[in-house]
Amino acid sequence: MDLTERKIDGDYKYFGKLVKIRLDSVRLPDGKTSTREVCEHVEGVAVLPINDKGEVVMVRQFRYPFEEALLEIPAGKMDNCEEGHYNCGLRELREETGIVPKEFHYLGCIYPSPGFLTEVIHLYLAKGLKEGAPCPDEDEYLSVETVPFEELKRMIADNIIRDAKTIAAVFRASMLLS
């Protein structure tokens, strides 16, 4: 069965610093038409840094849409297409935590909310961590915290950690590390 929806036309409704929003008309598999709201977002990277003690280096930062400070793995968006996700991950890890890893393993990518969002987040596992001084962006306020890997898995199971990129990276790393 062909499930493909084909775009008939589209109209951009908003151009922001981080996202573009468009409204598309589509032809459904049965021939009928419908609309789709699409939020275009640049690619990003999230890094699961695990130190020699088996602790995950994380960041806590306020997330305005949810009005709470969330504990997450270091992450960020690619500044430009030429940077690539590998270099973006190294940069974000260094900026947010000051860490430079000896090992940097690709864990694949995820689609955080594929019903309307084009964002792709690339996941990495960082090991052999060399600590340094963080240098976050001007408008970025965060605290660096460490959590034992097994405790982080419990926090995910207990719904304390709800950040999708953190959950996905821990799950994929668990498969590799077991």
Image (tube, rainbow, N blue to C red):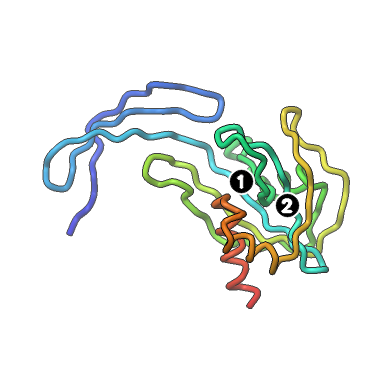
Residue in the picture at 23% in, 44% down: 5
Residue 53: x percent and y percent? 82, 68
Characterize the local packing of mark 1: few (<14), some (14-19) or many (20 or more) Cα atoms within 10 angstroms.
Answer: some
Residue 108 picture quarter: bottom right
Residue type indicated by callout 1: Gly
Characterize the local packing of mark 2: few (<14), some (14-19) or many (20 or more) Cα atoms within 10 angstroms.
Answer: many
Residue in the picture at 68% in, 48% down: 71
Residue 97: x percent and y percent? 79, 47
Confirm or deny contact between disc 2 and disc 1 (CB under 8 A): no
Residue in the picture at 12% in, 39% down: 32
Q: Which residue has dot 1 on it?
A: 84
* Residue that extends furthest to the right in the rendered view of this protein: 132
Vertical relation: 2 (above or below) 34: below
Q: Quadrant of the N terminus?
A: bottom left
Q: Mark 2 or 1, which is nearer the eye?
A: 2
Q: Which mark is residue 58?
A: 2
Asked if residue 116 lies left or right of residue 71, the reply is left
In the foreground, 106 or 68: 68
Residue 19: x percent and y percent? 50, 30
Q: Which type of secondary structure does the marked residue at label 2 adopt?
A: strand
Residue 136: x percent and y percent? 77, 37
In the foreground, 164 or 160: 160
Q: CA distance from mark 2 to mark 1?
A: 22 Å
Vertical relation: 7 (above or below) 71: above
Q: Quadrant of the C terminus?
A: bottom right
Residue in the picture at 59% in, 60% down: 156
Asked if residue 58 lies left or right of residue 39, the reply is right
Q: Which mark is residue 99?
A: none
Residue type indicated by callout 2: Met
* Residue that extends furthest to the bottom in the rendered view of this protein: 178
